[in-house]
Image (cartoon, helix red, strand yellow):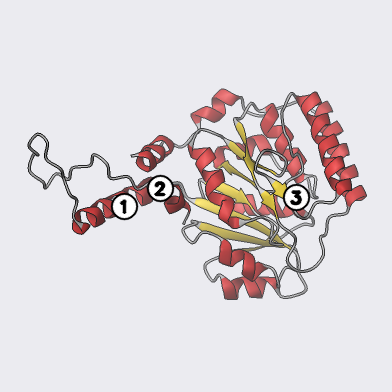
């Protein structure tokens, strides 16, 4: 589970209130009942203070992959939002069968950017996670992103190219193009991204006004990264390993979508920023963040 993976169960120095004071030099041995009581107390506190995590998954003909991806999502995620782009292989039916509690949203437009916009509007969690449906992003990494957000980041950005990251799927051509586009964005917008076009990200809900998603295609990651950077949000890169797609072929087209990314960069460079300031974003940070961190580190 997300919370349990981050929890550190240390009992050193803990003296339950039910025990009498210890004499000098005495050693306290906690019973199994004591440990269970303490864990139950911390579990109750954690559930009360833990942010609700919504996992947003855009889909288009992913009926074969979706069951495998859904099975790997930590089961204490607050909600799973699946946005379907008019699949013809029964993807929505598969989603309902595998994850009856999932929120199924039928996309109103076309493209990944539009799908994510629909998903963000439908999600109700404190933290939103962007997860691809093809199995390339590992859902087991979600706790890393959540931990970074609880530690003070506004936006946790996955990266295949920072230390401990990697990919078994990206081609040399796509890698070179990504690095060139990342360098361009870093130079124009004073950011320091190592992986501009990776779609595995998580963020607090208060980031949505700054992101103001208004694109339709695979340029969505570039648009979001530029806008959160311009808004002065605290962005932290998270090492991530991109796996091979499990079944089927990617809808990404290197030259077509690379051109869309480049046009997005140029358009954003000419666009006047209307995003809220960093101070306004900080004021929106949920009050339970520090409580959650304190609970996890207790």
In the figure, is residue 180 to the left or right of 38? right
- Image coordinates of residue 77 in percent, x first then y, are 50, 56
At a point 63% along the width and 70% down the height, the residue shown is 67
Which callout, 3 or 1, points at the residue further toward the start of the chain? 1
Circle 2: element type: loop
Which callout, 2 or 1, points at the residue further toward the start of the chain? 2
Disc 2 to disc 1, C-alpha distance = 13 Å
Label 1, residues with CA under 10 Å away: few <14, some 14-19, many ≥20: few
Q: Residue tagged by mark 3?
A: 113
Badge nearest the viewer, 2 or 1 = 2
- Image coordinates of residue 126 in percent, x first then y, are 50, 45
Which callout, 3 or 2, points at the residue further toward the start of the chain? 2
Circle 1: element type: helix
Q: Quadrant of residue 13?
A: top left
Q: Residue tagged by mark 2?
A: 7
In the figure, is residue 130 to the left or right of 298? right
Q: Residue tagged by mark 1?
A: 44
Disc 3 to disc 2, C-alpha distance = 34 Å
Label 3, residues with CA under 10 Å away: few <14, some 14-19, many ≥20: many
At a point 42% along the width and 53% down the height, the residue shown is 4
In the figure, is residue 18 to the left or right of 193? left
For the C terminus, the quadrant is top left
At a point 73% along the width and 46% down the height, the residue shown is 198
Circle 3: element type: helix
Can residue 240 be seen from the camera position used here? yes
At a point 55% along the width and 41% down the height, the residue shown is 204
Label 2, residues with CA under 10 Å away: few <14, some 14-19, many ≥20: some
Badge nearest the viewer, 3 or 1 = 1
- Image coordinates of residue 210 in percent, x first then y, are 65, 34
- Image coordinates of residue 78 in percent, x first then y, are 48, 56
Badge nearest the viewer, 3 or 2 = 2
């Amino acid at each position: 589970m997300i919370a349990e993976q981050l929890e550190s169960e240390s009992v050193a120095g803990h003296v339950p209130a039910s025990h009498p004071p210890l004499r000098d030099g005495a050693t306290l041995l906690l019973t199994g009942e004591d440990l269970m009581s303490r864990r139950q107390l911390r579990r109750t506190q954690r559930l009360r203070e833990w942010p609700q995590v919504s996992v947003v998954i855009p889909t288009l003909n992913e009926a074969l992959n979706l069951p495998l991806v859904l099975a790997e999502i930590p089961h204490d995620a607050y909600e799973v939002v699946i946005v379907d782009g008019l699949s013809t292989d029964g993807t929505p039916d598969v989603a309902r069968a595998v994850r009856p509690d999932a929120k199924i949203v039928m996309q109103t437009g076309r493209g990944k950017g539009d799908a994510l916009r629909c998903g963000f509007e439908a999600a109700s969690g404190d933290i939103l996670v962007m997860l691809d449906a093809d199995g390339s992003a590992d859902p087991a990494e979600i706790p890393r992103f959540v931990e970074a957000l609880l530690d003070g980041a506004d936006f946790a950005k996955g990266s295949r190219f920072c230390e401990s990251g990697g990919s078994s799927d990206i081609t040399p051509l796509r890698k070179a193009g990504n690095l060139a586009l990342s360098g361009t964005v870093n130079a124009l917008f004073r950011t320091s991204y190592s992986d501009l076009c990776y779609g595995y990200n998580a963020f607090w809900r208060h980031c949505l006004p700054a992101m103001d998603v208004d694109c339709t295609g695979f340029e969505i990651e570039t648009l979001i990264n530029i806008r959160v950077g311009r808004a002065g949000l605290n962005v932290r890169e998270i090492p991530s390993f991109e796996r091979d797609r499990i079944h089927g072929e990617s809808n990404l087209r290197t030259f077509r979508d690379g051109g869309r990314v480049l046009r997005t960069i140029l358009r954003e460079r000419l666009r006047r920023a209307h995003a809220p300031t960093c101070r306004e974003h900080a004021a929106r940070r949920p009050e339970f963040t520090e409580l959650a961190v304190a609970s996890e580190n207790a």
